[in-house]
Amino acid sequence: MTIDDCHDLQDLPNVGPATARDFRRIGITQPDQLRGKDPYTLYQELCSITGAHQDPCVLDVFIATFRFAEGAPARPWWQYTAERKRTYPLGPPARRSRSR
């Protein structure tokens, strides 16, 4: 399975109704729109649009989905938690700014 096999957001691995809704909030309505995007930037955009600091696991799902869009094999979202923690050891910036 590749992104070309996905015609709806929920066809993507790790994407259910809530994540599909989050993608639509940030302007992504089709799977192929994920190509070339940065999951970290779009996570920050989602936090800004919703006015709420999203759970860091949302970022893990974004990373998994965007990596799949780039051609990586489908993997469970939690396999990207370590990447997120390396990138943001204190938590995503939106979450850190809230706790100050």
Image (tube, rainbow, N blue to C red):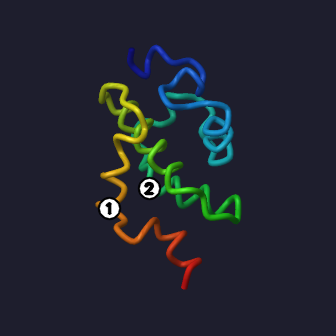
Residue 45 image offset from top left, x and y in percent: 58, 58
Q: Is residue 54 above or below residue 36?
A: below
- Kind of residue sitting beneath label 2: Tyr
Neighbour tally class for label 1: few under 14, some 14-19, many 20 plus, Cα within 10 Å = few
**Numbered circle sitting on residue 87:** 1
Quarter of the image with the N terminus in it = top left
Residue 33 image offset from top left, x and y in percent: 51, 34
- Kind of residue sitting beneath label 1: Thr
Left or right side of 34 for 2: left
Q: Nearer the viewer, residue 96 or 22?
A: 96
- Give the residue drawn at x 61%, y 30%: 16
Q: Nearer the viewer, residue 67 or 28?
A: 67
Give the quadrant of residue 35. top left
**Numbered circle sitting on residue 11:** none
Circle 2 sits on which residue?
Answer: 40
Neighbour tally class for label 2: few under 14, some 14-19, many 20 plus, Cα within 10 Å = some
Point out the frontmost of discs 2 and 1. Answer: 1
Give the quadrant of residue 22. top right
Tell me whether the residue at label 2 lies in contact with that at label 1, contact meaning CB atoms closer than 8 angstroms: yes
Left or right side of 20 for 1: left
